[in-house]
Amino acid sequence: MESEDRVAKVLASHSIENLRAFLNDKANDSATQPMLSSTGGIVRGAYPELKKLRENGYSLKVLVRLFEEGGVRITATTLSRYMTKLNKEAQAPATDVRTEKLQPEKRASERRAHLTMKPDIPL
């Protein structure tokens, strides 16, 4: 395998100044972050509307086409899995972890209680 010689690029000072000015302008602008970046996040965000459409008789294939028209690529299988998961989450009763009764942790001496030595019995 031959190694390639890499040549370092030399930038003119005006190129660096242009880059610094560009970065300075960007630093002063507020960054617009996308609200939902993953397919799962998009489905989660649109779940109430998707659920209503499904209740009104829309098929998964039609919903997939609607997503594609909106610029989101998703398969019917993936959409079905997300919908099933979100439906289960919506129907599951909310549990507050703080109110659950947990068994207290046993101390080391309590865990070893069954290993205590018994006095010898004389014969």
Image (tube, rainbow, N blue to C red):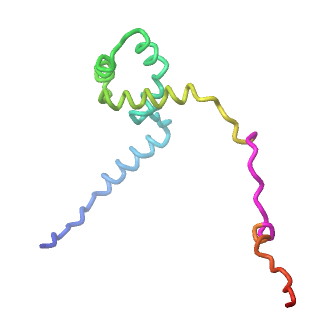
Using the rendered view, name the quadrant where residue 40 is placed: top left
In this view of the protein, which residue sits in the foreground, 5 or 102?
102
In this view of the protein, which residue sits in the foreground, 89 or 46?
89
- Say whether residue 118 is left or right of residue 65: right
Count of numbered badges drawn on the protein = 0
In percent of width and height, residue 97 lies at 69, 41
- Residue name at image x 35 percent, y 13 percent: 58
| Image quadrant occupied by the C terminus | bottom right
Q: Residue furthest bottom?
A: 123
In this view of the protein, which residue sits in the foreground, 56 or 3?
56
Q: Is residue 123 above or below residue 26?
A: below
In percent of width and height, residue 65 lies at 28, 20
Q: Is residue 101 magenta?
A: yes
Q: Is residue 107 above or below residue 95?
A: below
Using the rendered view, name the quadrant where residue 117 is placed: bottom right
Q: Residue furthest left?
A: 2
In percent of width and height, residue 95 lies at 67, 35
- Residue name at image x 75 percent, y 39 percent: 99
| Image quadrant occupied by the N terminus | bottom left
In this view of the protein, which residue sits in the foreground, 91 or 111?
111
- Residue name at image x 32 percent, y 30 percent: 77
In percent of width and height, residue 119 lies at 86, 83
- Residue name at image x 15 percent, y 69 percent: 4
Q: Residue furthest front?
A: 123
Q: Is residue 18 above or below residue 10?
A: above
Q: Is residue 88 magenta?
A: no
Magenta span main SS: loop
- Say whether residue 62 is left or right of residue 96: left
Q: Is residue 60 above or below residue 21?
A: above
Over which residues does the magenta segment extend?
A: 99-110
